[in-house]
Image (spheres, rainbow, N blue to C red):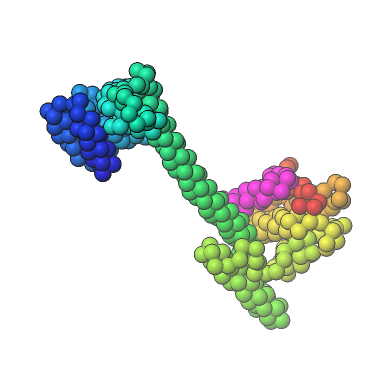
Amino acid sequence: MTLSVFCTLMALGLSADSGNVHDLNLALGLMLNLGAAVALVWRHERPWLVLALTLAGPLFFSTDATAALIVLYAIAKTERGERLAAAAIAVFLACAVSLTYDAHRTRDNSVLTMGATRPEVGAPKPEWDIAPWIPWFVAAVLVALVVGGAMLKHTRSELAEAEHSRDVATEQTSVMRDEVIRTEERTRIARDMHDTLAASLSRISLFAGALQVNGADNPEKVANTASMIRSTAHDALDDLKHIVGVLRGSASAGARPSGHQGIDSVAELVQSARAAGLHATLFTDLRPGDVGTVSGHVTYRVVQESLTNAQKYASDQTIRIAISGAAELGIRIDIRNALSAQPPTVPPGSGSGLRGLSEQTRDIGGTLNAGVLGTEFVVDCWLPWYA
């Protein structure tokens, strides 16, 4: 607004000093341009109304078109296409008319000729020696600069906003990805611990059953069984504490309460099942350290889940476990037991343990199939060697 008022006063001063403009023309031009300068406050809210006000002065009176250029700058930042073209043409005409008025002033009072070479002293002073196209050319340059500057600023603002939105989206994606990874890891650990607890509780149930049967006949066996119940319950409690820690996010996802459960722990796992009263045989030609850590852990989990299911549904049958493999062939796990004629000691489960194992083996590129084959329940699993 200040710039518009300054330019208006300067243009009217030059016109008055030139002496070739009527006083009424100057007065009306001053009032219109001062009103337009005040209206510039609302150029962003009502740009077209303000533009109409700013065009009245320079189109019909000897005054400047600075206010119209300011409004055009505001319009060019938001409008495109035909609306912007219409505004630019209107302001161009206003500027051209205003500069034509300026060109018709005396040489010393024309903005277009102030920098021109002055006549020598005593030589006649020309009143107007500018080519008719110059005011129109200057008007076109002014409009082009204003529109180009506004569009450039708008483009930079859009680029900055897009970059900010991209950074925000990248940050949100990173946070979501980290949360998904944490959730998947917690789910995996919780699934492992669930299966471990299920195995521990199944052994406790079998120990308790043996204690009930042999309690009166063999005091020494009662003591041993009670000790195994206590040890198994203690391990199960540690596992449960770890589950709670994982789900709360306070425990390390990679930590396991019972140490590393890999291929070297399978024999101990089978021995524990035997102590619980399960008939189990184990054949393996793999040695600790031969296979990858993840493959070893999944092998342990397959054996553990199979022993748990046998304890639940075929505790009177022998479960045969065979684990073999080589670096170029992978790991083959074959576990089978005859179907029991006795009713299961527990209600049928949901099958989540086997489904979870199937997901684990698939995640590392292996396969797992489990089901009834003839008169046997068979678990057949293949795992990569170095996973």
Residue 344 percent across, percent down from the top left: 61, 55
Q: Is residue 367 magenta?
A: yes
Residue 325 percent across, percent down from the top left: 85, 51
Question: Is 292 rendered above or below residue 235?
Answer: above
Residue 91 percent across, percent down from the top left: 30, 26
- Which quarter of the rendering shows the N terminus? top left
Pick whichever, 137 or 360, lies toward us. Answer: 137
Pick whichever, 263 or 386, lies toward us. Answer: 386
Q: Which residues are magenta?
A: 349-372
Pick whichever, 273 or 17, lies toward us. Answer: 17
Question: Is 213 rendered above or below residue 10?
Answer: below
Q: Quadrant of residue 198?
A: bottom right
Count of numbered circles in the view: 0
Q: Quadrant of residue 35?
A: top left
Which residue is at a point 66% across and 75% down the rendered structure image? Answer: 231
Which residue is at a point 42% across and 38% down the rendered structure image? Answer: 153
Which residue is at a point 32% across and 29% down the rendered structure image? Answer: 122
Pick whichever, 187 or 176, lies toward us. Answer: 176
Residue 245 shown left or right of residue 127 in the figure: right
Residue 162 percent across, percent down from the top left: 47, 41
Q: In this rendering, does residue 78 appear at all?
A: no
